[in-house]
Image (cartoon, rainbow, N blue to C red):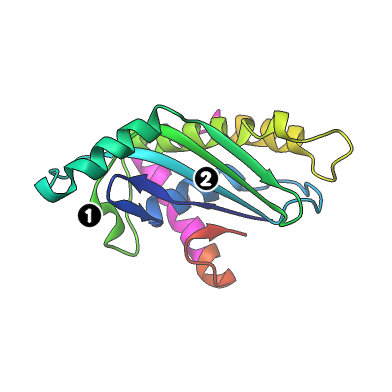
Amino acid sequence: MRVAAFAVTYRGMAAGPILSGCLDFLMDGVPALGSLVNKIELYPHCATADPVEPQFEDMLARFQARCSTLPIVRVYRRHKRAFVSYASKWVHTDAAFGAATVHPDTQAFETITCEMARALCLLTPSFKSSDDFAVKRLALHVTDRASKLPPDQDALRSALERYLKARERAGSRFSHR
């Protein structure tokens, strides 16, 4: 099963090393969950620290209106996919997506990782007990991982570097496999 995250702002969306690092930490050691879902996509809707360009003000208004309708959870059994869109407290910057590796501070890492864990837990009511997907096991795993965040910047940097090397070996740049 793959899990991917794409930050959504009023100007579009992007994947990047911050999101993949948080997912790597969260999904580290995840047990087998079943065959119903091959991919889960998370869409944190983020404010942006970059200045709003005048030509995009209408897009910002539509984005803010959409954020008021979140969270949205969808499971598409026939396509073996699940999606969770949610409002995020993380403040996105374009610079966070311009480099191959970015080391967030521990506060940003905690915010993003805990939000992702809560978003994955939102999937629980969308599955039936007869589904071949252990969504409760997933919820327990991510909740446990979110409670074991790296205690300081050095531990965080070490963990993210370890996950980056594992992703490079697996040939997966921005999503957990």
Quarter of the image that includes the N terminus: bottom right
Give the residue drawn at x 42%, y 37%.
112
Could you tell me the amino acid type at mark 2?
Leu
Residue 42 - label: 2
Question: Does 21 sit left or right of 80 as displayed?
Answer: left
Give the residue drawn at x 21%, y 42%.
58
Locate residue 168, reporting x and y percent.
50, 70
Residue 172 shows in the view: yes
Question: Does 159 sit left or right of 169 as displayed?
Answer: left
Locate residue 108, reporting x and y percent.
34, 36
Question: Does 46 sit left or right of 60 as displayed?
Answer: right
Vertical comparison of 161 with 116: above or below:
below
Q: What stretch of residues is rendered in magenta?
A: 147-165
- Judge the density around disc 1: few (<14), some (14-19), many (≥20) Cα neighbours within 10 Å: few
Tally the numbered discs: 2
Check residue 90 for magenta coloring: no
SS under mark 1: helix
Seen from the viewer's position, the closer of residues 23 and 106 is 23
SS under mark 2: strand
Seen from the viewer's position, the closer of residues 110 and 40 is 40
Could you tell me the amino acid type at mark 1?
Ala
Choose top left, top right, bottom left or bottom right for residue 153: top left
Check residue 161 for magenta coloring: yes
Residue 151 shows in the view: no
Locate residue 31, reporting x and y percent.
75, 46
Label 1 belongs to which residue?
95
The mark that comes first in sequence, 2 or 1, is 2
- Judge the density around disc 2: few (<14), some (14-19), many (≥20) Cα neighbours within 10 Å: many
The rendered magenta stretch, by its main secondary structure, is classed as: helix
Point out the frontmost of discs 2 and 1: 2
Give the residue drawn at x 38%, y 50%.
18
